[in-house]
């Protein structure tokens, strides 16, 4: 029985993003698209969060920060890469200070492309992320039972 | 108040006085930028005269990487952002920045990346130089060679079969008449 | 005398949409010094002029910042047009300004929501962003994109707004106005809002001039400067344009200035829509900028004056393209405003400069 998937809390962090995807992430949680009806709450504390919404590519300075936030989250956790810059680096992938998409720093579970990513895509991505969360939660419970 | 812009080149050692004069006249500081030109790094300082709407750009040209320039944060504190950035990206040293990050403003993988000339940029510059040189040579040739070309043609016609030469001459006349008509 | 502690603020913080790091030196509850550190969003996109020609670079310029996207593509296109001596048709100039003013409306309402969230007024945040959705729907109907519009090209604009769509734009804006006035009056006259914003982060007129601040941040300290006064492009056809100023100099003044600018933008759009000339929406641009040709341009973005510089090198790739964005100019002002404030007010003050760190760092 997975409680987290009934109300996944998200933490949002902007990597080296232009902000377009960030404001679409916030717009998804606002009354226009209302992600909050799925029980999604935007928290600022990594230890309270189940889903990590990352936007933007990673640059030299940001890669440690992204890893730090990911490491502080508790299992089971899911990472959603929002926007094409988070998936592959996007239009900036050959800039000198961009290392690449977020998967250069942390393992990603769901890729949501778009420039800027549309709120409809984000809702789909969060729902897909919740399924992955369910699976991970189940695997964790079984591992515990196995002990 | 009408908006106008101009670019003025100033020598590197007169920078501090020019900036202090702008401060005296209560001009507003707009920005500092650096350009990695072919012969060195140009710095452009912009100031706006709030009374007339003139945007003045002072250019300090062709500095080598590693040159020491005086900081203007004494007069305009907000320049610290640009001076730190230019230090990190281009390698110009500014002495006496009020808030100095000593190279840690941006964390960069390659030092002074804006001075790295990528193969694409080098190719583009070489191509542009070739095109410009070819154009100049063509223009020079056109001015000089108009007489010489006519002589060449006459020599060729003299050596040709007379019937053929007559046809060629007729064709040339038609072409000349057409060109004259088009010019009108 | 309290003991000084250094508290790191950011880069990840619920109130900050972007990563910015401040080391706050705090004594008891008062901030004595604030040392900013940026560099989390630096992508180095100004070097992309070498691989993307001057037409393709419009798309890169747009993506410097998602909130000011229209402004950056417009400023870039105007600078390159100046470099190459291209004259943009009147209709295209009007369309560009209409989209730019809509962008200003969406940016200010976005900011109002975030500022309300910064001091805990979350329901106001939700209301502002709900209202903003209507402006984004207008963007989607007229350009195809909600955030990144991709509608400006060197030489004009890519799409037209026909009369029916323009009438729809005007009617949506009029529909927003009533509800917006309710929000505005709550923010301006409510007791709790005033308690949290009046007297917080005060910067005097002299400070604002000394630090060369720009935008609504400076106009709240009574600095009479707005690039739209110069009357470039379609702004020159407005019957009257006066920058909105405030004497307050504190966070409250900045809220008031931005609230009123939204209403001013709605009026500008209505006036220009009524005067819209017929004609082409773009001129074809051929050739390349001359070697060593230079141009500079200023534009009033939602956050203030933005300076653009371009230099050509004879090929279709520009030699250098540079944007100096308003937030970077205002960083010194922000550091000064944080001096001596309460620790709990740091969020509010950082947000009132309307920081757009991705613009600053490009």
Image: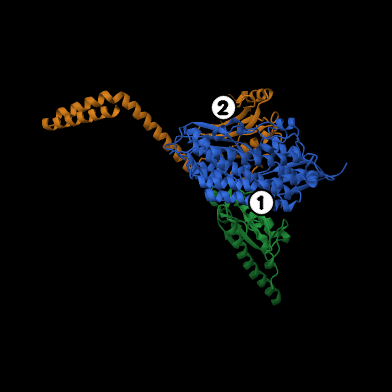
Chain colours: A green, B orange, C blue
Chain identity of mark 2 = B
Depth check, front residue: A6 or B25: A6
Disc 1, SS: helix
Crowdedness near tag 2: few (<14), some (14–19) or many (≥20) residues, C-alpha within 10 Å: few
| Image x and y of residue A18, in percent | 60, 48
Depth check, front residue: C168 or C36: C168
| Image x and y of residue A113, in percent | 55, 57
Q: Name the residue under label 2.
A: B4
Name the residue: 11% across, 32% down: B163
Q: Name the residue under label 1.
A: C129
Name the residue: 52% across, 45% down: C59
Q: How many marks?
A: 2
| Image x and y of residue A127, in percent | 62, 64
Q: Is residue B68 above or below residue C92?
A: above
Q: Is residue C362 visible?
A: no
The quadrant where residue B141 appears:
top left
Disc 2, SS: strand
């Amino acid at each position: 029985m997975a409680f987290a998937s009934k109300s996944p809390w998200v933490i949002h962090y902007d990597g080296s993003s232009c902000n377009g995807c960030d404001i679409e992430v916030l717009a998804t949680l606002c009354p226009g698209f209302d992600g909050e009806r799925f029980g999604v709450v935007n928290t600022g504390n990594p230890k309270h969060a189940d889903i990590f919404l990352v936007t933007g590519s990673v640059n030299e300075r940001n890669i440690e920060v992204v890893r730090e936030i990911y490491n502080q989250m508790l299992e089971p956790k899911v990472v959603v890469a929002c926007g094409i810059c988070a998936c592959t680096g996007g239009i900036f992938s050959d800039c000198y200070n961009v290392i690449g998409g977020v998967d250069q720093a942390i393992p990603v579970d769901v890729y949501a492309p778009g420039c800027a990513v549309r709120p409809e895509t984000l809702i789909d991505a969060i729902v897909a992320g919740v399924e992955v969360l369910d699976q991970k939660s189940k695997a964790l419970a079984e591992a515990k039972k196995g002990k | 108040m009408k908006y106008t812009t101009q670019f003025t080149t100033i020598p590197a050692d007169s920078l501090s006085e020019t900036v202090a004069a702008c401060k005296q006249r209560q001009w507003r500081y707009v920005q500092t930028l650096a350009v990695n030109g072919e012969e060195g790094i140009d710095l452009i300082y912009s100031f706006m005269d709030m009374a007339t709407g003139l945007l003045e750009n002072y250019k300090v040209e062709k500095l080598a990487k590693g040159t020491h320039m005086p900081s203007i944060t004494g007069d305009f504190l907000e320049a610290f952002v640009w001076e730190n950035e230019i230090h990190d990206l281009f390698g110009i040293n500014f002495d006496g920045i009020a808030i100095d990050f000593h190279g840690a403003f941006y964390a960069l993988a390659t030092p002074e990346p804006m001075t790295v000339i990528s193969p694409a940029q080098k190719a583009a510059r070489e191509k542009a130089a070739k095109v410009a040189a070819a154009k100049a040579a063509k223009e020079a040739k056109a001015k000089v060679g108009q007489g010489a070309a006519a002589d060449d043609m006459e020599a060729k016609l003299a050596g040709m079969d007379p019937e053929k030469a007559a046809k060629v001459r007729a064709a040339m006349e038609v072409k000349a008449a057409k060109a004259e008509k088009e010019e009108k | 005398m309290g003991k000084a502690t250094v508290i790191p603020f950011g880069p990840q913080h619920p109130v900050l949409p972007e990563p910015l790091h401040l080391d706050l030196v705090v004594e008891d509850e008062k901030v004595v010094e604030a040392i900013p550190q940026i560099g989390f969003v630096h992508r180095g996109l100004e070097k992309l002029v070498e691989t993307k020609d001057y037409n393709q670079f419009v798309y890169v310029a747009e993506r410097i910042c998602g909130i000011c996207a229209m402004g950056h593509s417009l400023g870039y296109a105007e600078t390159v047009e100046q470099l190459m001596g291209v004259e943009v048709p009147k209709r295209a100039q009007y369309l560009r300004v209409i989209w730019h003013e809509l962008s200003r409306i969406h940016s200010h309402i976005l900011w109002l929501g975030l500022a309300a969230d910064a001091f805990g007024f979350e329901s106001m945040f939700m209301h502002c962003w709900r209202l903003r959705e209507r402006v984004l729907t207008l963007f989607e109907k007229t350009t195809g994109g909600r955030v990144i519009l991709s509608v400006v090209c060197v030489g004009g604009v890519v799409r037209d707004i026909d009369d029916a769509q323009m009438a729809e734009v005007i009617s949506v804006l009029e529909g927003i106005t009533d509800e917006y006035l309710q929000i505005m009056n709550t923010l301006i006259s409510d007791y709790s809002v005033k308690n949290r914003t009046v007297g917080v982060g005060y910067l005097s007129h002299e400070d604002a001039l000394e630090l060369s601040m720009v935008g609504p941040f400076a106009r709240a300290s009574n600095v009479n400067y707005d690039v739209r006064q110069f009357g470039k492009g379609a702004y020159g056809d407005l019957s009257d344009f006066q920058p909105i100023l405030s004497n307050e100099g504190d966070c409250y003044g900045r809220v008031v200035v931005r609230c009123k600018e939204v209403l001013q933008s709605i009026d500008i759009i209505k006036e220009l829509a009524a005067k819209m000339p017929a004609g082409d929406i773009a001129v074809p641009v051929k050739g390349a900028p001359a070697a060593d040709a230079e141009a500079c341009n200023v534009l009033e973005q939602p956050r203030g004056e933005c300076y653009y510089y371009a230099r050509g090198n004879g090929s279709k790739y520009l030699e250098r393209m540079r944007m100096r964005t308003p937030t970077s100019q205002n960083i010194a002002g922000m550091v000064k405003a944080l001096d001596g404030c309460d620790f709990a007010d740091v969020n509010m003050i950082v947000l009132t400069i309307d920081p757009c760190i991705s613009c600053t760092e490009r």
